[in-house]
Image: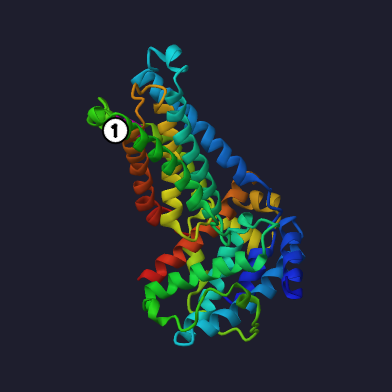
Amino acid sequence: MKTDDLITMLASDAGAVAPRVWQQRYALALGAGLIGAALLMVLLLGVRPDIADAVWLPMFWVKLAFPAALAAGALLAALRLSRPGVAIGHVGAVLAAPVLAIWVLAALALLGAPEDRAMLVWGETWAACLVNIPMLSVPTFVGVFWVMKTLAPVRPALAGAAAGLLAGALGAAVYALHCPELAAPFIGLWYLLGMLIPAALGALVGARLLRW
Amino acid sequence: MTERETQLRALLIGGLGGDEAAYHAFLKDLSRHLRGFLRARLARLPDDVEDLVQETLLAVHNQRHTYDPGQPLTAWIHAIARYKLVDLLRRRAGREMLNDPLDDELAVFAVSDTDAADARLDLGKLLEQLPDRQRLPIVHMKLEGLSVAEAARATGMSEAAVKVGVHRGLKALAILIRNKREE
């Protein structure tokens, strides 16, 4: 086929392109992912029984804010990495800020209570954290990959990592409603690792699945 | 923004709004720029230039919903052309074949080349490999120029299925080209 024939073929009846469809799909994927994660958490894990008391503790909100801030940064990264020719900008700094903040809190906690350090780091549920955060990330992971597949990431592995981190961060935010831990060192280590597992998986899957 | 980019952008935006003539002119003009851009960067693989022009045009068409009118057109086109070029070079010979830096977005509209060589990949043949539910809508609508309603009647498919068939078929065609390259 000659190039001119291809052009004629592509242009004929090409029709109008509906604007903002992909933004709507992102919103749908995130909404469904969040609801899916919440359902999995309620059905399989259960909301922590003392939640009514926990909401009065500042660390309860820190534990929610940390993954929520990472989710916002990861969403920004995912949106930018989904389409050709969009500069990624300062997303790295946006993602680093909440991590640095929780590490500062963690360092203060460890310095303030030298005799409790092992407890502050390991807590009682670190292994569950590494299983449950990736588990709760599954609905968003599938949804965001579905959207990205309809778009055109020119760096598929990085785009996949952003999708995985976004899913992991939303999963962690939901998991925080179940998890009894409140120590900053615990959150800065195990929550972060729990979110990085889907991010790493996203990079691997993205490199294969998101090529176009 | 250069004058050329302004013109091309206006044509593309017209095309995205449903103006077929504008979209045809956009693709036509773009093909010349892509040819010049890719020929300069594939000096050692001259036979691949026209294939890559076609593959990039198909990608631009399939991904046209990812263009944001607020975004420089050069950045968008350059990213797509570069992605397809790197993809080809990775398969063919590795990155050492790159004899030009690829990071200059403006370069994509700096050259123009109307002298189309023959493509080696025959898209017509690849089209035949698509399943009927994708191939027939493309043949009827895109090659024979039937309307959606006529194509639906000719194939016995619903109008929605015809539209989906064209859309998915062109995406499947892009994948067939990729796979063909891997052989």
Q: Nearer the viewer, residue B108 or A63?
A: A63
Report the span colored magenta.
A129-133
Residue A118 seen in this snapshot: yes
Give percent across and percent down for residue B65: 63, 54
Residue kind at label 1, given as amino acid type: Val
The residue at 48%/32% (across/down) is A65
Task: State left or right for residue B74 relative to residue A80.
Answer: right
Instruction: Give the residue at mark 1.
Output: A131
Give percent across and percent down for residue B93: 37, 79
- To which quarter of the image does residue A114 belong? top left
The residue at 62%/50% (across/down) is B163
Task: State left or right for residue A106 relative to residue B145.
Answer: left
Q: Nearer the viewer, residue B153 or B57?
A: B57
Residue B158 seen in this snapshot: no
Task: State left or right for residue A92 relative to residue B32.
Answer: left
Q: Is residue B54 above or below residue A49?
A: below
Task: State left or right for residue A185 relative to residue B135.
Answer: left
Q: Is residue A100 above or below residue B145?
A: above
Give percent across and percent down for residue B103: 53, 73
Q: Is residue A4 above or below residue A110?
A: below
The residue at 40%/65% (across/down) is B179
Q: Is residue A116 above or below residue A201?
A: above
